[in-house]
Image (cartoon, rainbow, N blue to C red):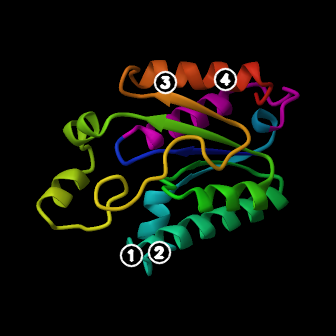
Amino acid sequence: MVIWIYGMSGTGKTTLAEKLFDYLNILPWTTRHELSRNQRVLIDADYIRKTLNEDLGFSEKDKKENAKRIIHMCELLKKNELNSIVCCITPYVESRLLAMKVLKDIVGIYLDCSFRTLSQRDSSGLYKKSKLGKIKNLAGVDSDFEYRYQGFDKWTLIDTEKNNAEMTFSILKNYLESNNYV
């Protein structure tokens, strides 16, 4: 199984993925659900971009290629009975549809937050760099971000503007439990 957490920069994808990863590690191994029973891997697209995908830029083509490589990485892990928790901006529906086609058993978690709040948070400094013209093609700023759930059959939306990290995790945990994913 793959949990694919996506949204614009600063919505809390990595924080949520790390909380989920830690939570699943403390569940009893004997649980009947695949996501908590099998080993899992956390795939942070920021890390992958700086290492394995350092040859890619931020054009639309490169963003789609970044997602495609991560999808196929998840496919390989899945073939080896490893679950993946992915945090990746994934701004294009085309990439989400590819993930669903290749991985089949995937749950999309869309983290939503207003641009105003994201640019105020700016934990990575990307919005400031974009405003100063130091970076181009930032998803949702001067490059497309095709919103919300489009692309996944199984999905949920969590508003990270109204919910802090703990509440966001609680919402995700309840969603996964109520749908028998954990």
Residue type beneath disc 1: Gly
Q: Is residue 103 left or right of residue 149?
A: right
Residue type beneath disc 3: Thr
Q: Is residue 138 left or right of residue 167?
A: left
Q: CA distance from mark 3 to mark 4?
A: 11 Å
First in residue order: circle 2 vs circle 1: 1
Instruction: Give the numbered dot on residue 73.
Output: none
Q: Which residues are magenta?
A: 11-34
| Residue 58 image point, x, y percent | 38, 71
Are the residues flagged by discs 3 and 4 in contact, CB closer than 8 Å? Answer: no
Of the 4 image quadrants, the one containing the N terminus is top right
Q: CA distance from mark 4 to mark 1?
A: 35 Å
Residue type beneath disc 2: Asp
Of the 4 image quadrants, the one containing the C terminus is top right
- In depth, the one of 44 and 110 nearer the eye is 110
Instruction: Give the numbered dot on residue 168.
Output: 3
- In depth, the one of 166 and 66 nearer the eye is 66
Per the image, the residue denoted by label 1 is 57
Per the image, the residue denoted by label 2 is 62
Q: CA distance from mark 1 to mark 3?
A: 31 Å
Residue at position x 32%, y 66% in the image: 137
* Residue at the limit of the structure toward the left, as seen here: 132
Are the residues flagged by discs 2 and 1 in contact, CB closer than 8 Å? Answer: yes
Q: Residues within 10 Å of mark 2 (few under 14, many from 20)?
A: some
| Residue 50 image point, x, y percent | 41, 68
Per the image, the residue denoted by label 4 is 175
First in residue order: circle 4 vs circle 1: 1
